[in-house]
Every structure is written in structure tokens, then in C-alpha cells.
Amino acid sequence: MNNYIAQVFRKTYVMAEMEIRKLLHDPTELITRAIQPILWLGIFGEALSNVHAIPTQGETYLQFITPGILTQSVVFIAIFYGLSIIWERDLGLLQKFLVTPTPRLALVWGKMISAGVRGLSQAIIIFIFAYILNIPLILTLWSIIGVILIVMLGAGFFTGLSMIIASIVKTRERFMGIGQVITLPLFFASNAIYPISIMPQWLQVVATINPLSYMVDGLRALLVSGDMTQIPMDIAVLGIATLLISFLSAYLYPNVVL
């Protein structure tokens, strides 16, 4: 049992390192991904900040929305990670991975960590742009550590979800359609761009079981409000959800090639 656990962690590191090297060899993805959060903050955020119609509990709207846009950027990167699984299958790479003694869980965790690193690159871009827009954020050692943890967990959860989708639909066209259907409702049914309190009752129920809401809540506490009372709950929910979905993803992973 101990040997299996050690092998899982060792192979997870190898898979994550391989995925991160792909990003370093082609950093254009990071540049293109930076456009979306910049547009949301620079146009949507600036425009809504002048309306003063959304209650933000004493924060400026740009402060309020920045953690939500960071969450959105991470989720959009992670949820389409399943495309790489389908692409690897079409090229025959996935079949080679599956015939090796590498534990399926290590393959899944490697993808999750890689998505988390991509998410952290988005965080750096958003922090720089927030500085340019003069958006005050709490950036201390502990808040940065907390951001890293929450981004990694959130990216891991939605990467696992995308891998499950890839295992079921098996084609890129269907995956893209389902990915859009899932991500947009999850984003708008969360506290990313407006507080849960102004939602209708039924939508508040959806928001409270939406993992994206816990990700936004944790980032907002770390970067804006400084209220850490709900941080343990946010991290616990994300951690449990990510762990459970990783096991389900590992179970379904071989189905991608069927």
C-alpha cells in the first residue's frame, strides 16, 4: 500500500512536470487567456462601478469583482482541459499512457496540478492589471499562500469535471458545447459578479451548492475583506469536492479511448 501511494505521488510529479513543460514551450496560451480577464475588469468592471446599483458591503465594485474574475479565468482554463485528453487520444498518446503501469490517479492529478499552474499565471496577470487600475487588494504572504491553495483546488475540481465530460462525450465538438453549457450557468449562478443576497430564492440555493461560489468567497476574503472566518469552510468544501471528483475521473479515465 505504501509503495502504491509513493508511486502515485512520484508519477503525479512526472505528469505535472511534463504538462507544465508544454506550457513553457508555448506561452502564447497565457497571452491569449489574459485578454478575457482584462476585458472583464477594464470594461465590465469599470462600467458597473459607476452605476452603484450592486451592494458590495463597503467595497468598490472593482474590488468586489476582481476575485470573481480571477475565479472565472481559472474555471475557464480548467473546464476545457478535457480537450487535451481528446486530442491526446486522437494522436494515440493517451493509449500509450494507459498501457504503462502509471496509476490512473496520477494521470488525473498531474492534469489537475498543471491546470492549477495555468490558473496561477492568470492570477499574476490579474494582480498586475488590478495594480494598473489602482484596485486595492490585500497582498500579504498569507493571503498569497491562501490564493495559491484555493486556485489549485478550484482548478483541480473543474479539471476533474472536464475529464469526466471528456470520458463521456469523446468528441471535441460535443465537449465544447457541453463545456459552454456548464461553465456559463455556474459562473452566473455564483457570487462572482454580484452578491448572493440579491439573487432570487431558488438561485440562492443553487449558488450555495456551487463550488465556484466557495472559490470566489475564499478569494474575496483573502484579497478584499480580510475576514477569514469562512476560509476553513471554503477550503474544506473545495478540498473534499476536488478529492472526490479526482477518484471519479480516475475511474472513468480509460473510457476516453473506448
Image: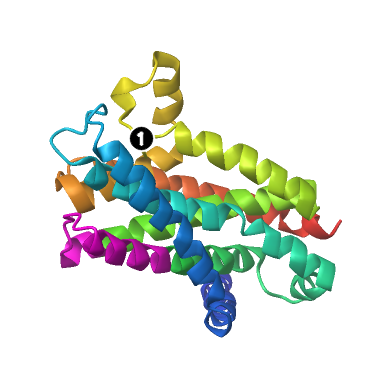
Q: What residue is drawn where x is 28% and y is 63%?
A: 127
Q: Where is the C terminus found, in terms of image quarters?
A: bottom right
Mark 1 nearby-residue class (10 Å; few <14, some 14–19, many ≥20): many
x and y, in percent, of residue 43 in the image: 37, 48
As drawn, is 225 to the left or to the right of 191? left
Placement of 258 over or under 7, stated as above or below: above
Is there any visible trace of residue 130 in the rendered image?
Answer: yes
Is there any visible trace of residue 3 in the rendered image?
Answer: no
Helix, strand or loop status at disc 1: loop
Residue 237's image quarter?
Answer: top left
Residue 59's image quarter?
Answer: top left
Q: Nearer the viewer, residue 155 or 233?
A: 155
Q: What is the three-letter code of the residue carrying label 1?
A: Asn
x and y, in percent, of residue 44 in the image: 37, 43
- Residue situated furthest right in the rendering: 258
x and y, in percent, of residue 242 in the image: 49, 51
Q: Where is the N terminus found, in terms of image quarters?
A: bottom right
Placement of 126 over or under 3, stated as above or below: above
Q: What residue is drawn where x is 67% and y is 74%?
A: 102
As drawn, is 124 to the left or to the right of 53? right
x and y, in percent, of residue 140 in the image: 15, 64
The magenta stretch spans residue 138 = yes
Q: Nearer the viewer, residue 124 or 205?
A: 124
Residue at image mark 1: 191
Which segment is the magenta one? 120-144
Q: What residue is drawn where x is 26% and y is 59%?
A: 130
